[in-house]
Amino acid sequence: MPESDDDTPACGRIGVMLPRDLPVRDMLPFARRAEELGFDQVWVVEDLGWRGGIAQAGPVLASTTSITVGIGIMPAGARNVCFAAMELATLAQLYPGRLIAGVGHGMPDWMRQAGAWPASPLTLIKEYTTALRLLIRGKPGPAGGRYVRCEGVVITETPDIVPPVILGVRGPKSQAAAGEVADGLLLAEPAAPAYINSSLQHMNGAPHTGSPEVVTYDAAAVDDNEDAAVARVRNGLTSVGEPAWAAHIDPLPFAAQLREHRAACADARRFAQTMPADWVRRLSITGTPAQAREAIKARHAAGATSVVLTPTGPDALASLDSLARVLDPRP
């Protein structure tokens, strides 16, 4: 792919993911370095068996001064909504305007393993999000529903700046729910522009007010050598051929070929290592700094308000510095 002649910075907000397997000694230095480099946001994840999202967000907020911290995502079935609202309200009080709360279904297999997968995930997430947004604002909890019961509960310690609550979901009905009951949408990786477009069509079919937050995740690698960046980012694409990622892949013109390629590969690693380089570029943010900037711009143009880069490679701190080259064009 040729180098772009456009060396202007990508518009819109750009964030970075704090890797879930980052050694604990590197967590806060990573967050501080992200802020020093000029990233707008740092996102923490909550995957079963790793680290808790709220427990990470607090120290990251405390160890930085201005960067926004996103939690993406907290499974609705994992916490009582009253206590989740208390935790988020406290963080938002202590660090005004610096928090975004992501809520989702959680991965079904994980949630079943934890005994927290509901009969109707859609009903739960709608009830949970409605209650959570009311409670954080200091308003009484709504009437009891099928899953969420907090009628009359009032949180007295509420923030002056209420954090956005966005839904990290894939299905069309769940994305429509984001338009009904939340402040926006979080799209897990890969979030190619076509997937952003289709997701926004689902969300925008529901009534909502204001301008929603639309946060996207993508595996990312940046290098002066395009081939080296493409090779490095492949490790972040091992899962995209699995059935759970169908919604991400279906809008792409090579969806059928990608499925055929996955079926022909013995495992996910082989799938990622042998897929065509053009697919890799479409499914990630990779290449030279200018090429990565163009990929970010395309996601912003498709409707993303924040594009979050997930570092790939063995050294997350070194990867962070290379990813920051998308923020400040160099000759």
Image (tube, rainbow, N blue to C red):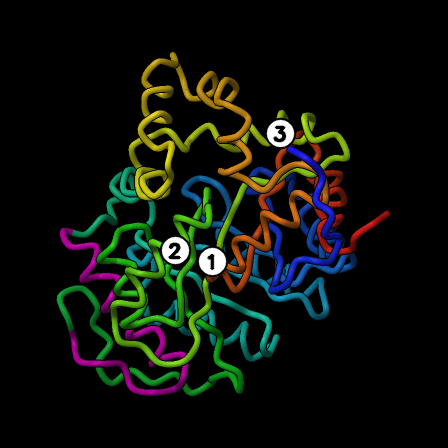
Looking at the picture, how far across and down is residue 274, in whole percent?
Answer: 50, 17
Which one is in front, 179 or 257? 257
The amino acid at mark 1 is Ala
* Residue 66 counted in the magenta span: no
**Mark 1 element type:** helix
Type of the residue with mark 2? Asn
The residues bearing labels 2 and 3 have C-alpha atoms spaced at a distance of 24 Å
Q: Secondary structure at mark 2?
A: helix
Q: Decide which of tag 3 and tag 1 comes sooner along the chain.
A: 3
Q: Nearer the viewer, residue 151 or 290?
A: 290
Left or right of 248 in this view: 93:
right
Residue count near mark 2 (Cα–Cα under 10 Å), binned few <14, some 14–19, many ≥20:
some
Q: Is 180 above or below relative to 1?
A: below
In the visual, does 5 lie left or right of 243?
right
Image quadrant occupied by the N terminus? top right
Give the labeled residue for mark 3.
230
Q: What residue is drawn where x is 46% and y is 69%?
A: 87
Q: Which mark is residue 302?
A: 1
Quadrant hosting residue 63: bottom right
Residue type at the position of mark 3: Val
What is the spatial separation of the Cα atoms under label 2 and label 1, in whole angstroms?
6 Å
Q: What kind of secondary structure does the magenta stretch mostly adopt?
A: helix
**How far apart, in angstroms, are the residues tagged by discs 3 and 1?**
23 Å
Q: Would residue 138 appear left or right of 147 to someone viewing this image?
A: right
Disc number for residue 152: none
Asked where in the image residue 62 lies, by quadrant, the reply is bottom right
* Magenta region: 119-144
**137 within the magenta span:** yes
Which residue sits at x=58%, y=47%?
A: 295
